[in-house]
Image (cartoon, helix red, strand yellow):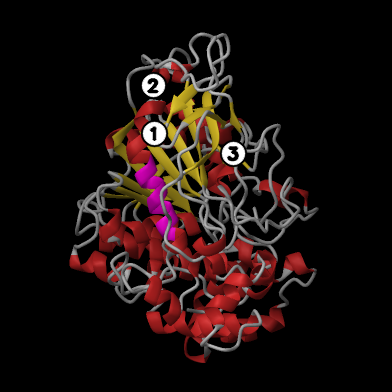
Amino acid sequence: MVAVGVLIVAGAVELAPEAALAGQADSDVRAGQVESAAWPGQSGTAGAAPRAGSGGGADGGPPVVRTDAGWVRGRVTDEGRRFLGIPYARQPVGALRWREPRPVVPWRGVRAATGFGNRCVQTASWDPGYEKPSHTEDCLALNVYAPAGDRGTKAARTPVDVRRPVLVWLHGGGLTAGAGEDVVPERFARATGTVVVTVNYRLGALGFLGSPALDDEASDGVSGNYGLLDQQAALRWVRTNIGRFGGDPRRVTVAGESAGGRSVCTHLASPTGRGLFRAAVIQSGAYDDCAGRTRRQAAGDGVAFARKAGCPDPATALACLRRKPAKDLLAAQAGFDWGPVVGGRFLPVQPAEAFERGSAAKVPVLNGANTDEGTLFAFAQFDGQGEPLAAERYPAVLDETYGPALAERVARRYPLARYSSPSHAFAATVGDQLFACPALRLDRSLAGRGPVYAYEFADRTSPPFASLRDRGTDFAFGATHVNEVQYLFQHFGLRSPLNTEQRALARQMTAYWGSFIHSGVPRAKGAPPAPDQRTHPGATLSLRTGSAGGTVIDKGVHRAHHCALWDPAAPR
């Protein structure tokens, strides 16, 4: 992996890709409060259960739904119903630190589901509302957004008792940051007639530490996959419970962006994920070919991390680490490649090998990246630090990043004269090498086992996401990493400043994604269907605004991103 890859995988960059790096969102009620089981307006004892069918809140009161662990009380909004902070696994605290997720302990009464659960352990962020780090391991919760049954778009105007397709969203953040609350999908749910679930999962060292001692405790003999096992536990919760929220457990699409997209890619290759979803969306998640660490790499990282955290003796390191406060572990986790580990039942072989063998899940996949993925990372490395990349430094930076053998060829393909600044030239190399070309390579690999639809988000006038808008910079980000998310969901709870034609593109993208969730085929009225890579290899749905020519099928994306340089097997 080249040095730039560390920016994403290890989170070793001050301006992290998804940027929701910690803190806890304010809410009037935090998840986990258990109230009396007496329904408002009911008489009886505290042990009386709410009446069946109250999940819709049709009587004007707050909606109450029974899960397999107990009753939860949500809230009615203008868009539908929301249930926040529902625990989907036992909290991994105390002796359960670095253990596989276990079933929730049932509760009595009605649990308030009106506030987000805690963000999993992570550092602070400069994004609004997340300025404080989270040191809380009590964080395995999910959020359910169900559209109103009798209002909204035509897709949403169906009876309440009709089960809707489900989207499970896995947040990004380099597997070291983020939370389910980073997106607010209520408008998407209403517009598409889907139930949307967002998930918290363990991050960083607490989610991905591997060691021989932990291998001995793992059910399949391989440790280091706790965060992804959390995600599968959430998917199993959905299979068991989502029908009570109006969702169809047989029609679940799992989706994610960046590290969330990489997670989806991993679940496609995981035998233990079979049957948990019927379709998948990978947004900017194909970097490093979705590769996991070997057991040897994970063990080496585990030894180095334990030493850095003040537990140098291998014989006692695990017990020592389990006694450490979460904040001490967080302070030691920077600089490591936290991610899945290959070799056990969860991930027997590398995803790329599973795809080539044809042993991956045979479900429809919508996969893509953004035109200017690399600008966020170049800005973080140079301009955002107050030191824009100088022209005379460009050759040296290429050499440091790609090695002498490749750097000269990269410089010829990405000459400074073609770009507005040296930072943008370097950004183009990063975006192509890490995102665009791996996405196209993944299309080819997946096409051997089922439908694959390729897209590229190409609105180069899109506004910077979240608090990049407040950085006081005139840096041109273009269609950078993460920017497409605000066209689908409200991002970080902020109103996105999209102009009229960008809002039209957002509606079109919502239609494509909604169609895929409903049918497994992405379509939008008045726009071309997304090309299936089995019959149209290399053709990509280029998502553009009207002034840029509108959405079209682009057969030259691999050439525009110089994929022949980065991938010898790419089409010429």
Q: Which mark is residue 32?
A: 3
Q: Which residue is mark 2?
A: 155
Q: Earlier in the sequence, mark 1 or mark 2?
A: 2
User: Is 338 above or below relative to 64?
Assistant: below
> Do the CB atoms of the residues marked 1 and 2 lie less than 8 Å apart?
yes
Q: Which residue is mark 1?
A: 514
Residue at the (26%, 71%) spot, across then down: 353
Q: Is 391 inside the magenta-drawn segment?
A: no
Residue farthest along the front direction in this orientation: 45
Q: Which mark is residue 437?
A: none
**What secondary structure predominates along the stretch shown in magenta?**
helix
**Element marked by disc 2:** helix
Density class for disc 3 (Cα within 10 Å; few <14, some 14-19, many ≥20) is many
Residue at the (52%, 45%) spot, across then down: 141
Q: Which residues are magenta?
A: 228-237
User: Is 209 situated left or right of 512 in this image?
Assistant: right
Residue 476 occupies quadrant: bottom right
User: Is 246 situated left or right of 549 in this image?
Assistant: left
Of the 4 image quadrants, the one containing the C terminus is bottom left
Residue 249 visible, this orientation: yes
